[in-house]
Image (cartoon, rainbow, N blue to C red):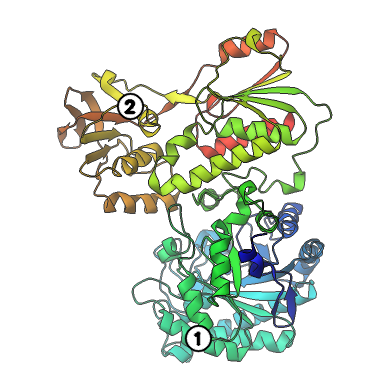
Amino acid sequence: MNEQLSILFEPFRVQGLELKNRLVMAPMHTKFASESGEVTDRLIAYLAERARGGVGLIVLENTCIDWVYGRPMGNPVSIHDDMCRSGLSNIPLAVHRYGARVVTQLQHTGRQNVRSNIPGGLPPVAPSAVQSNRGGDLPRALPEEEIEAIIQRFVEGARRTREAGFDGVELHGAHGYLLTQFFSPHCNRRTDHWGGSLANRARFPVEVVRRIRREVGDDFPILYRMSAEERIPGGTTLEDTLQLVAMLEQAGVDCFDVSAGIYDSIEAIYSLYGQPPGALLPLATAVKRKSDRPVIGISRLGWDLEYAAQAVTDGRVDLVSMGRSLLADPYLPKKYYEGAREEIIPCIACNDCIGMMERGWQLRCVVNPQLSNEYLEPVKAATRSRNVLVVGGGPAGMQCALTAAMRGHHVTLVERDARLGGQLLAAAAVAEKAAEMSALIGYFETMLNKHGVTVELDSEIAAPEDLPVQPDVVVLAIGAKPDRLNLPGSERVISAVDLLTGKSGDIGAKIVVIGANAVGIDTVLFLSQTPDRLITMVDEEAETGHDLNAFLKLYTASMLQQRSINVLTNWKAISIGIDHVSGQTSTGTETIECDTVVASGGFRARSSVPLRRDFEQRGASVHVIGSALDPGMIFAATQSGFWIGAEI
């Protein structure tokens, strides 16, 4: 282990609880619980895998204290009734086997809820009738008797936490939920003793902590997660929060877990690709300087544990929390400890994990196909070792080759280009994505070598008889190719992938990119890396990034604006001339002068029929995967490759 990292792997105490190291798994909603909030085998296996991977403390995802009004959408874990203790008790039993500790995170959504998620279509509840701008219906203001009842629900949730065998409890006072709402001058407009002055707005969270401490005793740790800044006009400031910290400490909080943002400022909660680690650490450091209690810091720290270790060494934080990095690789702590950093599956900070959940899916990861399937133990040793040929070194082919090799097959991977990566190489051309995409390609290269995969670059399979060893199984991961534009003059159009992978010549200074999808956005960001270019992106759709998750849409729209990219939506290209593109808009025909036209539109699978037929005639079992089967994004590629590799 790198000596600089040693401080992260030292034991650490929170109140009377000893942790084996300073690494914390952040709470993340998985939707792995049942529809009624019960703990499932899927959830237990997911948590046990992270404990096995070496983390010291796990904070269970948002744990519901009020199943009627406080329940977040999509299968949260529930602790609203004594009968919940039975299933919950299986979590600490599983986690403790590997020396990790675990706490619940008690949560009430408050105004960040919708009528359709509440029985009878009732309105959400909140300190005041102030509606969230994102993801909430107009709430009703809570009368005092209901406030008292909700405090008691928090207390009962803490009691059940202890009775179920957990090691402590965290209160979710961050990201705009009910505890946050009471303290926020934006959300709390009350004029009684639950609102108004800062002390009155702090009364609800302080009372919750005080009464929980009375219930659980002095030896049961209470953690408090807070958004140190709401980052909205009229919201909570860091100065406000530091006053709250002193009050919560006096009430009985043992550790502060510091984040930022609420739903209305959701971009503050999730750091995305191209953003360095530690963006929120200054907030945690400010809390640490105010309090003598341990402080947890977060924000892409799993991307660079050396940086995180330095923050601990410098006294800026005491514990390091990781979220999405542990979704990508649950063994990240162990691999760092053993000096195998190059074997870590890197989180590429795309936020598709959250985006898929917003569509109603359970938690998934673009780069870790085993996430949510841990209970299946899908990578089992093969009953018979076979010769496997994988044709194509993109994400689908690399994932399939690696999975098959890990199971004990003899695998050869053939790629026609000079290096592995496929369309990941195109994405890596964008400065903001270069580090993440290059790290992902590097991970595959390392692991393919470790597991004995024979990699042949600059090679194409012309005919099966050319192979020195005839395979038992063939996997065709030959990808997709851009569809040609069906427009007059389209012969002078170059493809976005060719541009991004350096296969185009001089393109001039004035460029039009047709297609404002993910590839189109990558293209204009890449083009804007060269100064003095006039770049226009057009699309028939009404918005940019229509194939991106909601978070990346916001992020990339901001980048396009900062780069002064001319974006024209509801603009349909109809013809391409020598020095222009013509398009149809709502007001008629428009012409854009340009030197080069780049198409980033649809893709179609490369034909696999001839190769498939030839290999099948020679007795091989043939599979077609990834974009060769159905053109899609990285998630579809890695899923396709993994599951075929797991079933060979």
Q: CA distance from mark 2 to mark 1?
A: 58 Å
Q: Quadrant of residue 580?
A: top left
Q: Is residue 126 at all visible to an observer of this figure?
A: no
Q: Is residue 92 above or below residue 627?
A: below
Taking the spot 73% from the left edge, 52% from the top edge, the residue there is: 42
Q: Quadrant of residue 197?
A: bottom left
- Position of residue 144 measured from the top left corner of the image (x, y, whole percent): 53, 86
Q: Report the residue marked by disc 2.
A: 504
Taking the spot 43% from the left edge, 27% from the top edge, the residue there is: 603
Q: Amino acid at mark 2?
A: Ser
What secondary structure is marked by label 1? helix
- Position of residue 402 measured from the top left corner of the image (x, y, whole percent): 67, 35
Taking the spot 47% from the left edge, 33% from the top edge, the residue there is: 423
Q: Is residue 243 above or below residue 503?
A: below
Local packing at callout 1 (Cα closer than 10 Å; few below 14, some 14-19, many 20+) is many
Local packing at callout 2 (Cα closer than 10 Å; few below 14, some 14-19, many 20+) is few
Left or right of residue 443: residue 20:
right
Q: Amino acid at mark 1?
A: Leu
Q: Nearer the viewer, residue 405 or 9?
A: 9
For the N terminus, the quadrant is bottom right
Q: Quadrant of residue 252?
A: bottom right
Q: Residue furthest front?
A: 3
Left or right of residue 468: residue 240:
left
Q: Report the residue marked by disc 1.
A: 244
Mark 2 and mark 1 residues within 8 Å of each other at the beta carbon: no
- Position of residue 168 measured from the top left corner of the image (x, y, whole percent): 71, 76
Q: Which mark is residue 596?
A: none
- Position of residue 550 measured from the top left corner of the image (x, y, whole percent): 43, 51
What secondary structure is marked by label 2? loop
Q: Nearer the viewer, residue 83 or 97?
A: 97
Q: Is residue 9 above or below residue 518?
A: below
Q: Nearer the viewer, residue 381 or 575?
A: 381
